[in-house]
Each structure stands twice: as structure tokens, then as C-alpha cells.
Amino acid sequence: MSHNLRATSSDRSCDMLPPLPSLPQTARTPSQAPTETSSLDILRAPLARLCETLDAIFEACVRFPEPSDSTFFARGMRLALAEAASDPALLTPAQREGSTDTYRRHLLAADPHGRYAIAALVWQPRQASPVHAHHTWCGYAVLEGTLSETIFEWDGARHCASAARVQARKPRAVSFVRGGRGGIHRLGNCSDAPAVSLHIYGVQGAQLATHVNDLVRVADSTIMA
């Protein structure tokens, strides 16, 4: 399956999800524990459970050269995000702190094998991402507040993207897309209250700011908000 295929509606979002499927268990030794931005030496329990679930998903998809090509992988990631988003103890107060300049990213954990990185994004009112596709697979869930997501369609002939629709993303809304120009969007906070979202990317922790977003040209200066 090509990474450039457009994500289906079931890949992009799911509001009410069943429990996680049974997955093989993988061991994580103390030396393999992912890092956290706080001063704690041990991951908080909700985040540790999320890492264990992600490890199990990768183990179940080990026969695929690219795990994200598997339908099971996409479904598993959406379910893992939904389960994590339902736990109010997932983040510390420090990991909910924003910035007055732009949305703020907190690295929560990084897989020691470089398969994924987990981050919390904090959006103050009127803050938004640039319009972008993704160099890698990624998924997110809204934890607090409401985000506005503008979906774009890629025009290969004109080499630009056009806004197609806008949807409100409320708490526990979940999205997953594979890498490529089939999942172009812009996330933003159009409300008067802060919002927080949980993101998982298929990159090493050190690559979070450089190897995820693929900025694209927009067809005109009018962006739906």
C-alpha cells in the first residue's frame, strides 16, 4: 500500500471506539524505558501503559516492512490514543503549560528503538499549525478543549493544496494518517480557552521538530478556519 494513498474516513477519525484488541505482551527493561520531560525517573503509569501498548502493536506488525501499511496498525493506534485520552492522569500540570508565542510541544516519551515519539501539544486561543502533510505516520487525540481541523486536498498538477472542509475536534476525538500528501491538514484553536492534544509520530524523539511536518503550498491566501 502506498504511503501517498488518501486516508479513509475510518483512518482519519473515530469518536466511539471498542476496547483494545488482545495484543502480544512485550517486556521493557528499566534501561529501555522511554524518557520523559519531567524530572521523574519512572514514567507515570498512564504513559507507561501507552508505551507498552505501542510496543505490542509493533510486535504484532513485525512481518510488515512498513508497519503503518497494516490495517491492524492503524486501528491499534486509534484505539491506543482513545484509551490514553480517557485517562485524566496522563499529563502532569507542567505538561499542560502553553506558550504565548505559538503552540507548545512537550516530548513525553521516545521509543529506545526509534519507532515512535509521544508528545503533548498545548494550544492557546488563536494558535494554529501551518498547513502541512506528514513525512511519517502520525495520530492524535484531543485531551482538553476543542480544536478546529481544516482538511486539504493535494493537487498534484498545480503542486498546491486546497481547503476542503473544516471539522471541530472535541475531547476524545481521534485521528490517524499515514505519511504522504493524502493527509494534509491544519490544526488550530479557534476557541477562547486553551486546548491540549496527544500526538504519536513515527520518528525518533530527537526528530520530532524536524522530520514530521511536510509544509505545503496552499492554492490561495484564504484558509478556512
Image (tube, helix red, strand yellow):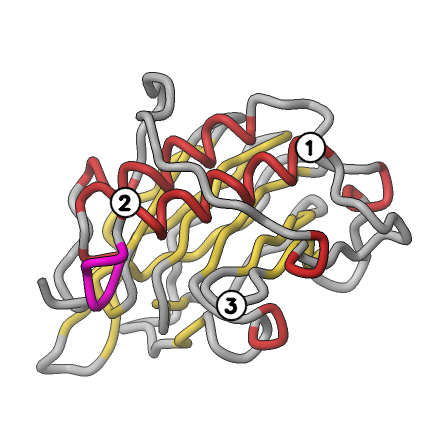
Q: Which residue is mark 2?
A: 74
| Figure check: 166 above or below 178 | above
Categorize mark 2 by other alpha carbons within 10 Å: few (<14), some (14-19), many (20+). Answer: many
- Position of 212 with respect to 128 (left or right) is left
Residue 27: % across, % down: 53, 46
Circle 2: element type: helix
Q: Which mark is residue 90?
A: 1
Question: Please, what is the dominant secondary structure of the magenta stretch?
Answer: loop
Instruction: Please indicate, yes or no, whether residue 88 appears anywhere in the rendered image.
Output: yes
In magenta segment, residue 65: yes
The amino acid marked with disc number 3 is His
Residue 15: % across, % down: 36, 23
The amino acid marked with disc number 1 is Leu
The residue at the point 67 percent across, 54 percent down is 33
**Front of the two marks 2 and 3:** 3
Circle 1: element type: loop
- Quick one: label 2 or label 1, which is nearer the N terminus? 2
Residue stretch in magenta: 62-67
Q: Which residue is mark 3?
A: 113
* Nearer the observer, 117 or 31: 31
- How many angstroms separate mark 2 from mark 1 (CA)? 22 Å
- Position of 19 with respect to 199 (left or right) is left
- Position of 16 with respect to 144 (left or right) is left
Q: Would you say the residues marked 3 and 1 are in contact, meaning their CB atoms lie under 8 Å apart?
A: no
* Nearer the observer, 197 or 192: 197
- Position of 30 with respect to 173 (left or right) is right
The amino acid marked with disc number 2 is Ala
The residue at the point 25 percent across, 69 percent down is 180
Residue 48: % across, % down: 64, 40
The residue at the point 20 percent across, 68 percent down is 65
The quadrant where residue 101 appears: bottom right
